Amino acid sequence: MDHLITVNLKVNGTDVTKSVEPRTHLVDFLRNELSLTGSHAGCEHGVCGACTVLVDGEIVRGCLTLACQLEGAHVQTVEGLTESGAIADLQTAFHQRNSLQCGYCTPGMLVCASALMDEHPQASREEIREYLSGNYCRCTGYEAIVDAIESTMKNRAAGKALAGEDA
Amino acid sequence: MNAPVPGLKPTTYIGQDTPRANARRLLAGRGQYVDDMHLPRELHAAFVRSPHAHARITRLDLSKARQARGVFWCGTGHDVAAVVSPWVATLTHFKGLKSAPQYAVALDRATWQGEAVAVVVAQTRAQAEDAVQLVEVEYETLPAVTDMETALDATTPVIHPDLGDNLAFTRSLDTGGVGDVFAGAHLVVEDTFRFGRHTGVCLEPRAITADYDASEHQLTVYLANQAPHMMRDIFAKHLDMPESNVRVIARDIGGSFGIKVHVYPDEMAIVGIAKLLKRPIRYSADRLESMSTDIHAREHRVKARMAVDKDGRILAFDMEDLTGIGPYSVYPRTSAVEGNQVVNLTGGPYDFRHYIASLKVVFQNKTPTCQYRAVGHPIAVAVTEGLVDLAAQKLGMDPAQFRRLNLIPDDKYPYTSASGLKFEQLSHHACLDKLLKLMDYPKLRAEQAALRAKGIHRGIGLAALIEVTNPSALFYGVGGARISAQDGCTLRLEPTGWVTAITGVTEQGQGTEGMIAQVVASAVGIPVEHVRVITGDTDVTPYGGGTWASRAAGIGGEAALQASKELKSNILALAGAILKRDAAGLDLRQSQIVERATGEVLQPLSETARIGQYRPDTLPREFQPQLSVTRQYGQRDWPFVFTNGIQASYVEVDPDTGFTRLLKHWMVEDCGTIINPMLVDEQLRGGIAQGIGAAMLEEILYDADGNLKNATLADYLVPMAAEMPDMVFGHVETPTKSSELGAKGAGEAGTAGAPAAVMNAINDALAPFNARVTDQPFTPERLLKALGKV
């Protein structure tokens, strides 16, 4: 494993250049090379979704993506989405509704939910459940997570409607 | 005529849906799980694990691994045994329980697939894992004991020859006269129930970083664990160190559910190697290691029967439980507890006097089993409720009416059950009434009948339960386990008027810290935002048991309440000294010192605290403010403070495919004083989801040679968002008189009852086909077999 590959990418808006082993997964790269420990490795099989991050706006599994594949890509993690304020309303809704317990699945859940809200801002509860079906949570039984996403979507829609009236 | 009081009134957070403060950092991705933290000069460990269920190690060659890049150290079981002494997991109150000495890393023989046989330490985890591949191990495979049904046969090899046989523990219970009752009964129903092996599947795998500082002979262990003080004692004992030189720190924990409350051999090895190498050593299990080395639970086969009189009254239970626990009893809580609980809890909600039970706990070459959320309860509840529904069906009685007839009357307490359990005050009938109303039972039955006529097969299942919470020392301490039965809370008034609460109960996401903050804020008289809670550090917190057996609110909450009352009294004494008033006429409300009678604001607490800390020179010479207090609490009135509840499941079964759709789930529960209704409901909900996993999906599968067949999350199925029904909750509050707070636990009742409710609902749906399932999980294949279609 002497061979290293240099990869240039953007992580949470910041340019990053690193030399990585070809086998290094994105989640390990984020955690070990960049100390972005919000993304978690849960199953290492692409099943549990704890490592979910955005790559060029699409949700991907950090445990199934190799860091060296990401030349020129833009990776967004829970840390970046938190600092930009992009999911502040969703995080508040999760907090108020206690939509998390141990918190280990939560960053992946938030990233996944934020993609859902962008793609399908009027999703029904069933559609929310279906969209989250790649994200495992052992603690909550999911209902509070669905509640928080649903209420955030409604608030965003109401906010947009209000903004439209103002304009 | 009383004029309205113009001043401040007392406020309380007890009973409020207060969001928990510590959730914010988890939402921001700022959690501090063990694997998130790094220490200078740390090294990474990886284990060589046995691919065989039972095998003698005939050659173990570390030479190639030692030459590998980045490798710092490699060792065998013997190398680790030089620093970590073995253990035998028995307790004296389980008479006859036996087990063999277990080593951190196997010495000469592996006894389950996944047991560590060697360990590699390297600069990075990847290097350590690479080097594991270079360790050469030759095995002589030995016959594997896998089937618990034949584990005691004369022809089956004995796993530990020194023990004489494969029987770890046996227990019999007989109230007397049971045979005659069965012989004379109007109806006897019987069945056999099988329960798949499960594991907790914490999303955060087990993780540990151990740091040994030789200069101070100090061991610091960062560990995802529910019982830091228990682990400190164990590390000290098996590393032969003074307990005070060991510090265990449990920060954020990514799920636990009882999985992270046991001693794991690989974690003992890490601690030993850290001491040996005098360097920080870290290890985090991968998912395959989690599935094969986290404790398993619940592999039981129960044959049971129940006698009923002509009016439908339960007369007696007869139960025989067989369970397989793997090759060792798990340290230090032992693997006898689960089966013991099944014996204790069977029939638990019902009023009957005759009971006979026998339990056999046998060794096998599979992953060791131990306590996982709702220990024993889901088995006892499924057996009991399965027989109850069967009897109701045979008698042509409505299952709700059958329960109303047989549940222990709410005015018959204190009550001692046939198995000897003591109940302070339960509320089965109030809960049943509330449940039937909540789910609109008659309407649901009508809907079911109407749909059945159209060929849609829905079923309704009920399951009453009791839950062991707030344990006394009779759970472990009496048997010699050094597991604290009490817990403490230290409160410190800060000069700002805020309070720091430091408690021995721990947080794994259930909301322990939020619960403590609500109790303290309410009892001291300050906003909840002014309470900061610290948990999970044996150098800092009062000695205590931690969080397990649904004890955090009931035990830790009471300690926090008593500490709060004392701190408040001390604050008022200080305020009295400052204000030159009688403290008895003062109160503390919303961070203001007020006149008790009128609520008139006299001084902000921040000012009182400032003077107490910085200007004691202004106080009378003889008055010393006491602004830090500690109170401890152990529950001593009852062996356990039981809770009760009842669940209902509504399902639709497709008789052509065998698929079951969960439509809705209800639960009414009585956990005494509810501190935070939202947190209690989320405990019930998450617990029910785990119980549904048991009923519908989860089963660890082994082949006849002891090979674990589904050790990934792609193969071992857990409940996901799309499969979970919406759940509706109701509560009855019967505070326990064993504490002033009155809180009982709520962490396990969901898991305890959900499998039984789902089973009864499925069988209700299958009733027109004369079909019935009792082997969990209730897979489509098992339903189709029951329907005679495959």
Image (tube, rainbow, N blue to C red):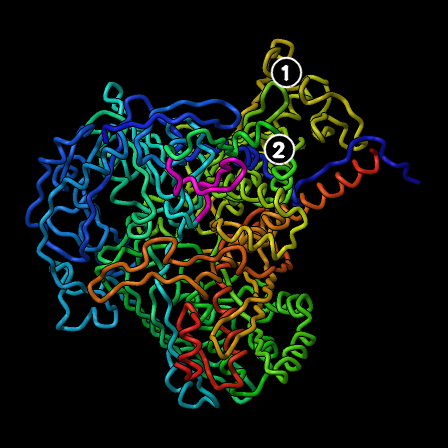
**Callout 1: 10 Å neighbours few (<14), some, many (20+)?**
some
Q: Which residues are magenta?
A: A48-66
Which residue is at a point 48% across and 51% down the rendered structure image? A134
Query: Which of the 4 image quadrants contains residue B409?
Result: bottom right
Callout 2: chain: A
Q: CA distance from mark 1 to mark 2?
A: 41 Å
Q: Which mark is drawn over residue B201?
A: none
In the visual, does A61 lie left or right of B1?
left
Foreground: A16 or B19?
A16
User: Does the rendering let one see residue B759?
Assistant: yes
Find residue B18 and report its horizontal and vertical position in percent. Answer: 64, 41
Callout 1: chain: B
Q: Are marks 1 and 2 in contact (CB under 8 Å)?
A: no
Find residue A153 and report its horizontal and vertical position in percent. Answer: 68, 45
Which residue is at a point 55% across and 28% down the rendered structure image? B500
Badge 2 element: loop
Do marks 1 and 2 share a chain? no
User: Does the rendering let one see residue B744?
Assistant: no
Query: Which of the 4 image quadrants contains residue B86?
Result: top left
The quadrant of the rendering that contains the C terminus of chain B is bottom left
In the visual, does B772 lie left or right of B287?
right
A104 up-or-down from B30: above or below: below
Foreground: B275 or B126?
B126
Is residue A65 shown in magenta? yes
Kindly identify which residue carries mark 1: B610
Kindly identify which residue carries mark 2: A86
**Callout 2: 10 Å neighbours few (<14), some, many (20+)?**
few
B447 up-or-down from B364: above or below: below
Foreground: B168 or A114?
A114
Most extreme residue toward the left is B58
Most extreme residue toward the front is A72
Which amino acid type is marked by label 2? Ala
